[in-house]
Amino acid sequence: MTQFKAGASLILGGARSGKSAFAERLVDESGLTKIYLATSQAFDGEMEDRISIHRQRRGPEWSLVEEPLALIEVLQKTSSQNACILVDCLTLWLTNLMMAERDIYAECDALCQALPELMNNDANIIFVSNEVGQGIVPMEKMARDFRDHAGRLHQKLAAAVPNVWFVTAGLPQKLK
């Protein structure tokens, strides 16, 4: 068993680091009903392939909820003490919010403000997100804004949840 405290968790890592597979193992270990909350949208064949790989790896015992924008509302509707919800992933959610020209600050604040109530309802939520701030500073403003939004969201969530991991090369390191 992994050192896992009930409540909410944040799993960070780079692209193809193994963070989603690790998150799925945590959900399996919880023994609760498995819900996968997908924030991705398949705009091309490559993304369709990625989604297919994730679905095959999870198997049929997972319930799937697809929601690119209304993350908080879906968490409020699906959270219960009998379920463990895997949100994959927050950086795609941020991208969706940016493309929809939503207020990123307000959306991220609302998510963090909703966490205490969700955790008081014994919700088990595992957030997966890409750590994008360890490379060079992007040249384009939108890419810099994205990196900054992700960094701020990760800091706020990491402060609010009882579990934080960083995954590199498939190896999870517990940070909190």
Image (tube, rainbow, N blue to C red):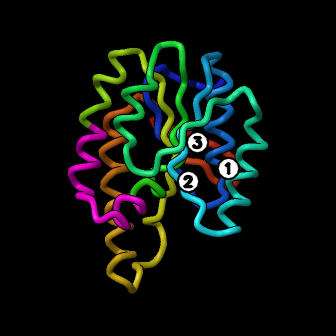
Mark 2: few, some, or many residues within 10 Å (few <14, many ≥20)?
many
Report the span colored magenta: 95-112
Tell me, for residue 13, which label it has, or none. 2
Tell me residue 164's x, y (percent): 47, 38
Q: Which mark sits nearer the N-terminus, 2 or 1? A: 2
113 and 37: which is toward the camera: 37
Separation (CA) of disc 1 from disc 3 = 12 Å
Camera-nearest label, 2 or 3: 2
Q: Quadrant of residue 101?
A: bottom left
Separation (CA) of disc 2 from disc 1 = 8 Å
Q: Mark 1 points at which residue?
A: 18
Asked whether residue 81 appears in the rendered view, the answer is yes
Tag 2 secondary structure: strand
Tell me, for residue 173, which label it has, or none. 3
Q: Which mark sits nearer the N-terminus, 1 or 3? A: 1
Separation (CA) of disc 2 from disc 3 = 10 Å
Tell me residue 135's x, y (percent): 48, 72
Q: What residue type is labelled 1?
A: Gly
Quarter placement of the C terminus: top left
Marks counted in the figure total: 3
Asked whether residue 11 appears in the rendered view, the answer is no
Q: What residue type is labelled 2?
A: Gly
Name the side, left or right, on which 41 lies relative to 44: left
Q: What residue type is labelled 3?
A: Gln
